[in-house]
Image: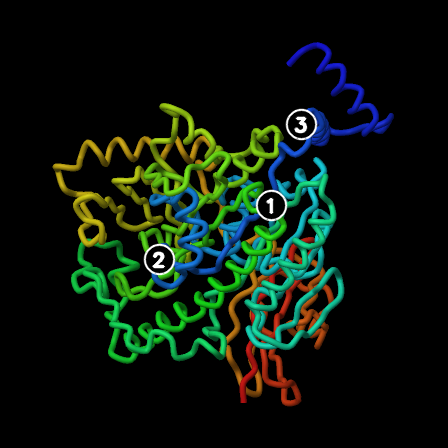
Amino acid sequence: MSHDRDDEILKLVETMTGKNRIWRGELFAVLLIAAACLQAQNLPRGSRPNILVIITDDQRFDTIKDAMPRTQARIFNEGVTFTAAYATTPLCCPSRSSILTGMYASHHGVLNNDSTLNAVTFVERLQQAGYYTGLVGKYLNSVEATPKPCYDYWVGMPSEGEYYNPYLNVNGIWTNPQGYLTYLLRDYAIDFLKNAAARRDQPFFLFFNPKTPHLPLEPAPSDTNLYSNLLPYRPPNYNEQDVSDKPAWLRSKPRLGAQAQKSLDSLRQRQLQMLWSLDLSIEAILDELKNQGRLDQTVIFYISDNGYFWGEHRLTGKVRVYEPASRVAFALRYPALAPAGKIETRLVANIDIAPTIYQLAGLPVPPEVDGRSLLALFQPQPDWRKELLLEAWPPGQYYSAAHTGRHVYVENENDRPELYDLTKDPNQLQNSVDDTNYAAIVNDLKERLRKLLTAIGDKTPPGPIPSSFALLQNYPNPFREATTIRFVTGRRERVTLQVFDISGRLVATLLDRQMNAGEHALKFETPALPNGMYIYRLQAGALAQQRKLVVMR
């Protein structure tokens, strides 16, 4: 950086801070913003692209081609498809936080769906650098769906909201529009793009975050007969018969019975049905950009926050290290940079979106970012990562893994480690950690994993529960007349326990007083409460957690 450039930044810092005293961390933030603003100002007009990030919810990596042919044709085929793409923590809130920050979960601190993100996001810096910013759809599970200051346009939804006639927060006002959620969000996204079109000299950023195909499984009315002749999904690792080589947590899981298999077949069909309406919605959004003449001036990222098990290894859901949960669909469309039809096989992840956006917007990549800008992959002979950290905190256990693209080495807390050779064993049927033929690879990956964890200051991974209290899952849920809400406090402090409906309206305050340390149980009776989804929120001191509550009669 030149001396003239240094002087410009110092002058801008003086303007921004005046005579106020600032701490070291705040000073760095001011310096970063100042440098970003000057860098953005010095770019030629029109050189900063628009940015559209599409995040689907619980979508498997293998559902694009057949269930979403329009998205396949117009984003994946017209851009770069990343075939070795991963969610570093395969759970909604941690993964989305990694997208927003470019950081591993153990770095940004969001370890489960109840954790709160406190780190600065790239959206804040884009807005400071002059971008018109918007969010349409799901944000973070632990955050209420009310507007956030770094978004100029906001259509938020409760993370446990409905697909039909949902409650949405539109720029600070709760509304209850009639219709199917995916199509309603499509219309709001198009409305944002029309607003952005009126700001021709201002680039835009949009998060389009549909809930599809997350539970509850409710396809659009017109799509409920799709895939009626779908063949059962039975890959070699489906309902895995021999798990004697696996860690104890998996060995303890029984094989799926006939009813469970039938339910999974239905789940798969309905998820595919739901993706059809999303495919149509994305096509409409791309058509709007094309009609505005801005499609090719817009960088489009498409990614899922995590995958989902359809019975592999006897599993359902997510938040496990195996490929169906950790591997995600990921593509980048931007004709000025990415050649159409390119297939990229090197390791990429959700943490790579933030640094790529910083570079595209002409902003410096903050030093706390763990990801790598994808732009390096378009250079000859790039210096690219040789391994990726995967980590998560499923109930009662932490795992960390070093993934090289071919080999996956996993360390399970207080349990057996694992090694899989994905070239020879793509279905991860054989744990080769004790195979002498792989001894050198195991030792190498142990050291690589140690370096990955050390690099982010994670020698002793933090637990998933805040230190002052833990909000335990209520039982039964759903419940009919009453349930017991249980929680633990680690010290004496003021505790507030409240229940809200999905629009954010307060239904009941069950507790608001000083509580001693210990485990507590509070009975909640709701004879007059209408059927539906609710959220109960516990606050102890400065910390808060929330969980869903379902009333059914």
Quadrant housing the N terminus: top right
Residue at 33% x, 72% y: name it: 264
> Is residue 430 at all visible to an observer of this figure?
yes
Quadrant housing the C terminus: bottom right
Residue at 61% x, 68% y: name it: 184
Query: Considering only vertical position in the picture, is 525 above or below 385?
Result: below
* Residue 281 at x, y percent in the picture: 53, 63
Q: Earlier in the sequence, mark 3 or mark 2?
A: 3
Packing grade of label 2 (10 A; few <14, some 14-19, many >=20) is few
- Spatial distance from mark 3 to mark 2, Cα to Cα? 38 Å
Q: Earlier in the sequence, mark 3 or mark 1?
A: 3
Asked if the residue at tag 1 contacts the one at tag 2, i.e. Cβ–Cβ closer than 8 Å, the answer is no
Q: Dot 1 corresponds to which residue?
A: 294
Label 2 element class: helix
Query: Considering only vertical position in the picture, is 187 above or below 80?
Result: below
Residue at 34% x, 51% y: name it: 321
Q: Which mark is residue 29?
A: none
Q: How is the image coloured?
A: rainbow
Label 1 element class: loop
Asked if the residue at tag 2 contacts the one at tag 3, i.e. Cβ–Cβ closer than 8 Å, the answer is no
Is 269 left, or right, of 338 in this rendering? left
- Spatial distance from mark 3 to mark 1, Cα to Cα? 17 Å
Q: Marks 3 and 2: which is nearer the front?
A: 3
Q: Dot 3 corresponds to which residue?
A: 44
Depth order, front residue of 239/198: 198
Q: Amino acid at mark 3?
A: Pro
Q: Which mark is residue 65?
A: 2
Q: Amino acid at mark 2?
A: Lys
